[in-house]
Amino acid sequence: MATMADVARDAGVSVATVSHVLNGTRPVLPHTRQAVLDAIERLGYTPNSLARSLVTARTRSIGLAVSAISNPYFTEILQGVEAAALEHGYGLLIADPHDDPEHERKAVQLLHERRVDGMIVAPSAEPQALLAYLRRHSVPTVFLDRLVEDAGPLFDQVCAESAEPTTRLVTHLAELGHRRIGLVAGRAGLSTTRERITGYRHGLAHAGLAHDERLVVHGDSESAGAERATDGLLSLAAPPTALVTANNAMTIGALRSLRAHGLSVPDDIALCCFDDFAWADLFTPRLTAIAQPSREIGARAVQVLLDRLAEPDRPARTVRLDCAFVHRTSCGCPEQPPAKGTVP
């Protein structure tokens, strides 16, 4: 079995240089780094991760705590996190907190006990126990997707814009002539829910429409809850003529409710949704949506965490990424011609 000394001889460098390349403990010239990596490949050298972690006090692993991993949005975030972690030589340990505050704290504690170097967490609506644990143990952490208002100076945060894109959906529906626009909002207490409700209200104000509290219902960020919430909207004496759903799972629930009530989109009711997903383009009609840069969110969270590990005392930062408006036909607009240079 090849040793580090064998790699150093083959690459024509010192054992210390090989160690720096493997552990990232000192900058190494690109051509020297490549020579070491080529020697590792030729010799089939496998670093002793346990021994390396004892020397560096680092395991080169990241803990990821994200609920609803089966949701396409979070699946793509996971792919972004994994790809970025692997690119920087880090492994990934994953836990699902199930959006439950107590389970969340236990999941994070379990990851911490596995000696991860830092964590990326999509916090629940009640993250007090989580914050207390992370602060008590000084765990380098990046909050993902959902912001924590009282996170303080210890934690970085990465998310997409939520308010302005929701405003754009509401404004678009108002421009099409809709005056009663309903919102199927997410789980109460989440920053994404608060911000999308704010964006909804801004959209109404921009269009000169009055805010009717009866037109805002909570679908608890999942399909079944959104189906029940949409049922409630449709039972109003004056139901909405258009809907905005605040995430992809709730879009599915809303569509189930509309179908059960015999309503056709967009002929009977227009629909716009927050979150684009792989099969949104396959629905009939095709779904007008806000597309979040999910993989980029995951990759950026890794980079922000690595920056924190490299400079533990750096000021905390919140990174917000822009979303894209994907204009299709569920809003009631005719089919859009493909952009120049694209394949229809």
Image (cartoon, grey):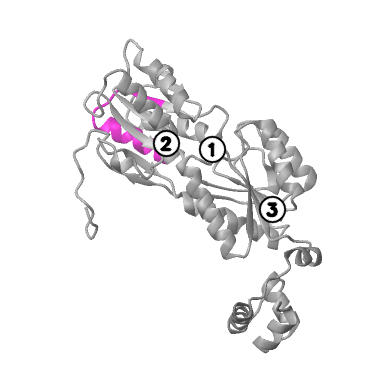
Instruction: Tell me if residue 45 comes above or below residue 180 in the rendering.
Output: below
Q: Position of residue 336 (x, y in %)?
A: 21, 45
Q: Secondary structure at mark 2?
A: helix
User: Where residue 93 sits: x, y (%)?
Assistant: 64, 51
Does the residue at mark 3 contact the one at mark 2 (Cβ under 8 Å)? no
- Numbered circle sitting on residue 118: 3
Question: In the rendered view, does 311 fall on the left or right side of 248?
Answer: right
User: What amino acid does circle 3 point to?
Assistant: Gly
Q: Which residue is mark 1?
A: 68
Amino acid at pointer 1: Ala
Real-space Cα separation, disc 2 to disc 1, in angstroms: 12 Å
Q: Secondary structure at mark 1?
A: loop
**In-front residue for pair 111/214:** 111
Image vertical order of residue 117 relative to residue 219, above or below: below
Query: Which is nearer the N-term, disc 3 or disc 2?
Result: 3
Give me the C-alpha separation between circle 3 and circle 1: 21 Å
Q: Residue at x 24, y 57 (%)?
A: 342
Q: Secondary structure at mark 3?
A: strand
Identify the residue at image location x=72%, y=60%. 59
Where in the figure is residue 30, as x and y percent of width and height?
59, 80
Instruction: List the residue tagged with mark 2.
Output: 248
Q: Which residues make up the magenta segment?
A: 165-183
x and y, in percent, of residue 112 in the image: 74, 47
The amino acid on which the numbered mark 2 sits, given as a three-letter code, is Asn
Quadrant location, the N terminus = bottom right
